[in-house]
Amino acid sequence: MIKIKKNTVSGHPIAGLNGTSGRVVNAGTLSIDSLAELCAENNTVTRADTLAVLNALFIECRHALKNGYTVSLGDLGSLQLTIENVLTPDLDNWTVNDNIRRVNIRFTPSMAIKRAVAIGAEGVRVQVIN
């Protein structure tokens, strides 16, 4: 169940609005070990086999990203590298060390997973708490 907590917003620093909004309450974190255990309970593979596959997936995703690939994770979404730049006036003065502030990884969820967790989707229950 998705729990949503109502918040009162007054004098929002950017929009300057007052009113009530909602935010999703985090139900906790599922670790790779927990996910492996859940997968093992619902399939014929063991927890150890599931962990081995998930660890191999992590290693291959890391390798692919390091080589500039976008990683498609099927119905889960995709991973892609992005960079945060510092602008320089001209092309000749641009260097990696001086102008790349940091490298980020962007996760883009697939439409399938977005639809699966959308409010009103089949099996999605919502509880509003104060």
Image (cartoon, rainbow, N blue to C red):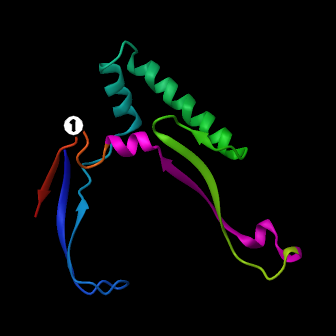
Which of 40 and 88 lies nearest the eye of the viewer?
A: 88
Residue 68 x %, y %: 71, 47
The residue drawn where x is 13% and y is 57% is 128
In this rendering, is residue 88 above or below 63?
Answer: below
Question: Quadrant of residue 62 in the image?
Answer: top right
Image quadrant in which the N terminus is located: top left
Is 51 left, or right, of 115 in this rendering? right
**Residue farthest to the top, as pictured:** 44
Question: Quadrant of residue 51 in the image?
Answer: top left
In this rendering, is residue 36 above or below 73?
Answer: above
Q: What secondary structure is marked by label 1?
A: loop
| Disc 1: which residue | 123
Q: How many marks?
A: 1
Residue 104 x %, y %: 59, 58
Which of 65 and 122 lies nearest the eye of the viewer?
A: 122
Q: Give the range drawn in magenta.
A: 92-116
In this rendering, is residue 25 above or below 15?
Answer: above
The residue drawn where x is 33% and y is 40% is 116
